[in-house]
Image: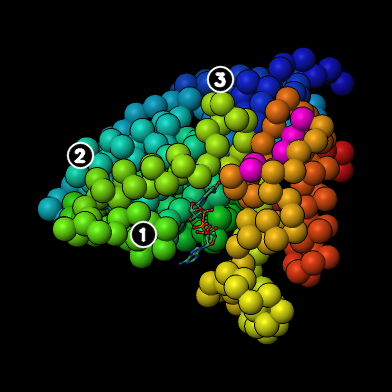
Amino acid sequence: MASAAEDLSALTTLELPAKATARRDVADLPALREALDVARAAGLPVIVLGEGSNVVFAGDVEALVLRYTATGRTVLAEDDESVTLRVAAGEHWHSLVAWCLEQGYHGFENLALIPGTVGAAPIQNIGAYGVELAPFVEAVHAVRIADGESLVLSRSDCAFGYRDSVFKGALRDAVVITAVDFRLQRTAAPVTDYPTLREALAGRAQAPGPRDVFDAVVALRRARLPDPATTPNAGSFFKNPVVDTATADELARRYPGMPQFEAPGGRKLAAGWLIEQCGWRGVEGEGVAVHPGHALVLVSHGGDGRALLALARRIQASVAETFGCHLEIEPRVYGVAA
Ligand code: NAP
């Protein structure tokens, strides 16, 4: 078996030390298919990375780590009401959001400053401040890792859910997303009912426009969340759990003030609040920590993936013991013994 040789620490925003058997950056479809052929011939599984902002390497991996770096934005159709864009997977998500704002293509403002690439965005159906990606997606273009075949998935094929999609389920590690088609509106309809955003936009003489929403979201995220460039992290480390209504009512009785939100299947609890109540905010050790400004974000100060996952497990155990609910890890985790 080939020994792991390629350093991965610079490829993820957590900067965890880990190695892979091989790594390749490919910028077009022929190069992608060629790299997949090489991996298949060598019997290596393929791990696809974008900007590595939602991935944890807990140890070395026997795999080809592949980045599809193609860029480009094409207008497929445009009329007075809407525009349909095809955007290559290697585009930086926030740059696309800023460009759409400049062009007068509306809808993405609340999703400003989310780290990562366009190709990564459908995987966890990125969402923030009351908006999620799914309704804007017309199609996802992908190449199947097993045989290099091209696939086009419709929005319903993507099976989008809360921070979830088919790319985390049946198609996990099975395709490379190469482009996404989006439909955006030419008339702005700002979504401002998310509480912290509404507060940030309060007190204006005029109703906020898309530029105001974009600026407010950027300011909120900068104030609350650590910048991965200076504090290695992977954003929210846990999903917000959804519990059935009877459980939620019982929790609300025992813990007055617990935030709860209506959600399909019951009510969504705020994972950050649960973690903070268990006393984890700011806890650090072994080179990893719970961010002092936001308990949902785990950060690395030079620690490794093993230490980070050990911290995550201790947090999961204490939240389960206190509140009886399971926190699911949000980023994709690789390099853990099965
Ligand atoms: P917050 O405003 O402190 O609220 C805490 C949690 O409560 C959020 O996770 C949010 O769920 C939920 N929530 C609050 N008001 C809600 C409402 N009116 N309806 C439904 N759910 C509500 O949140 P925050 O941590 O500062 O984050 C602000 C936004 O940025 C959130 O939308 C969050 O998802 C997003 N964000 C995403 C990441 C990531 O890595 N994916 C990291 C940080 C923040 P939701 O998460 O479902 O919105």
If the image is split into quadrants, where does the C terminus sit?
A: top right
Residue at screen point 22% across, 38% down: 102
The crowding category of the residue bearing disc 1, from other C-alpha atoms within 10 Å (few below 14, some 14 to 19, many at least 20), is few
Tell me residue 316's x, y (percent): 78, 55
Which one is nearer the viewer's eye here, 255 or 81? 255
Q: Assess whether residue 50 is covered by the magenta stretch.
A: no
Which one is nearer the viewer's eye here, 262 or 279? 279
Residues in magenta? 287-292
Q: Amino acid at mark 1?
A: Glu
Q: Assess whether residue 291 is covered by the magenta stretch.
A: yes
Residue designated by label 3:
25
**Disc 3 vs disc 2: which is toward the camera?**
2
What whole-number distance in Å separates the C-alpha atoms at marks 1 and 3?
Answer: 43 Å
Residue 89 placement: quadrant: top left
The label on residue 199 is: 1
Tell me residue 155's x, y (percent): 44, 57
Image position of 183 (left or right of 305)? left
Image position of 139 (left or right of 204)? right
**Disc 2 vs disc 1: which is toward the camera?**
1
